[in-house]
Image (spheres, grey):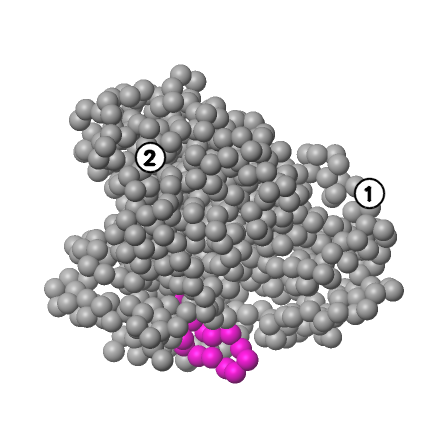
Amino acid sequence: MGKTLFERVWDAHVVAQQPGHPALLYVDLHLIHEVTSPQAFSGLRARGLGVRRPERTLATMDHSTPTLPGGYAAADGAGAAQLRRLEENCREFGIELHGLGSSRNGIVHVIGPELGRTQPGMTVVCGDSHTSTHGAFGALAFGIGTSEVEHVLATQCLLQTRPEPYEVRIDGRLKPGVTAKDIILALIARIGTAGGTGYVLEYTGSAIRGLDMEGRMTVCNMSIEGGARAGMIAPDDATFEYLAGREHAPRGQAWLRALERWRALPSDPDARYAKTTTIDGSALEPMITYGTNPGMAIPITAPIPSPEAAPEGTDQPTLEKALRYMGLQPGRPLLGQKIDVVFVGSCTNSRIGDLRAAASVLRGRRVAAGVRTLVVPGSQQIKRQAEAEGLDRVFREAGAEWREAGCSMCIAMNGDQLQPGQYAVSTSNRNFEGRQGPGGRTFLASPLTAAACAVTGEVTDVRTLLTGSGTVPAVGRA
Amino acid sequence: MAQFTTLTARAVVLAVDNIDTDQIIPARFLKVTDKAGLGSALFCDWRKDPAFVLNQPAAQGAQILVAGDNFGCGSSREHAPWALIAGGFRAVISTSFADIFHNNALKNGLLPVVVTPALHRELVAQLGRQPELQLTVDLEAQQLSWPGGAATTFPIDPFARDGLLRGIDQLDYLLGHAEQIAAFEARQQA
């Protein structure tokens, strides 16, 4: 029997495995950031250990970093102390750091691929659950805790029990206004936030093949929101085209050898998955969340579910609690719900394609009065590219704030946050209670939908603002 | 790592499904460089409600949390088990746990106990009638029991169980494989 992509990558990285024990899995790339690494370095020091492979470790600052100019001076005391600590740790242990002020700084899951560090067939880990993003390249990539960060620093290995492969097949052609974000929200709404627990998802099908690398990263990014350990997509020409010429991508003969290896990665035709879910991509609508976890998502035109008629597998008291927190009435449409804030950013949707999508709606339009709109690029490189394309002007002229790169309001650790009771439409990945600030209420959606909501000041179906072609805004002008 | 053998303690019920790590410890408390001192951050936002279960006198001294399905979903922050431990908890009973939280808990001597939905319902009902009930989690025997209730076996990965019973850190196990790791690296280079 053939192997799946996941099994191939897993098997190639097992260093040792005793019967009845978890496998020692080798880690090719270890990404670290300021929030989940300090205790791991303290652990190394306490044991007198070094970092086994500093050159396989890459550090960035993203969670606590200010998105207003000013660098450290703009960070709060505790945040700045954490940033300084990362700087000291990287200096002491010889780890490459793209800190504040670096032209390569950005969100960890944006810069890994951007620099060409993330490559097909690799194992990639980070003390961050959205490490699943890197699976878009056919890497096995997953989030780990701080104890495990220490394990990888010290040994370049992790003890892991093998998850099972789970195929998520999405065929068909997406309708105008429907994006990668809508695919993944629809999947999580279908399988629930624990539907992927114990599995590694492999996304297949023509709708997935039709996505560019940024869209594939958006899909894989939120695999963890469905409970999955990781999400993967087999590498193809789109993958290779994205990587070619990137700073750390192989060159010359090494590139040709890499291509040969990478082309052998996709799942064999006779490979077996432990589970399969199929979704008709052509039937998908723009999606939005209404509750307090990413599985509580509906097509944007659908009514808010009522606890009495809760979808299968939904716990009634949990849904009631969520609607109470969100201040929403079951059975009513979400369309027209007034909003206070729009956030375009995060490791899910802060790449150049996301910014272009938001700009395509905002170009020639104005953000509605009273709505605060924050556009936060995923990296300094993306920021520069967006500025070269004039997107910053589009955002500013529309009345949105154009910020420095970072996680920003996705996790609200750097001062960018909602006020209690405020409603936000956010392109990020989590609508948990208080995630974007204590008492804040989050609707997750795509950059297109978020931009449409910014313009009208209420939950809006972006398709009402699109012209026939589906990509050009009605009143847009370049 | 902290050893775990047998625990007999009172339990507190928080039977909400999908309790994410942002609720266990909100992100604004992650701007620390130590593991210690996170007890006051545990369920900080939910604690603002005076009626919240952890604010009740009966919750004082409880060392077991009985939580809803898919406990610990969301972020990979190990601060979640650190905060639970700092808050006095040594075991969490649920029908399922999110993967990363499950791994993180085991590495800190916080025991995730998986029970069937039927047993979970029975336990929640029993604790509703008898909040003072002492539960016993016996890791050696892999059994959960309480006075007047039949002992139930719970599953746990044998490797993790052995590590908890002996208080062995996984890093020592990994460091013991230095030769195999070096051999793997040599093969990968070739």
Crowd around label 1: few <14 · some 14–19 · many ≥20 (10 Å): few
Please provide the residue range marked out in magenta.
A12-29
Chain designation of label 1:
B
Q: Residue A250, how many percent across, how many down?
A: 19, 62
* Residue pointed to by mark 1: B57
Compared with B52, B76 (above or below) is below
Chain designation of label 2:
A
Mark identifier at residue A448 = 2
Judging from the image, what secondary structure is the residue with disc 2 in? helix
Judging from the image, what secondary structure is the residue with disc 1 in? helix
The amino acid sitting under disc 1 is Pro
B64 with respect to A364 (left or right): right
Crowd around label 2: few <14 · some 14–19 · many ≥20 (10 Å): many
Q: Residue B167, how many percent across, how many down?
A: 65, 70
B56 with respect to B180 (left or right): right
Compared with A170, A347 (above or below) is above
- Identify the residue at horizontal 70%, vertical 48% (top origin): B14
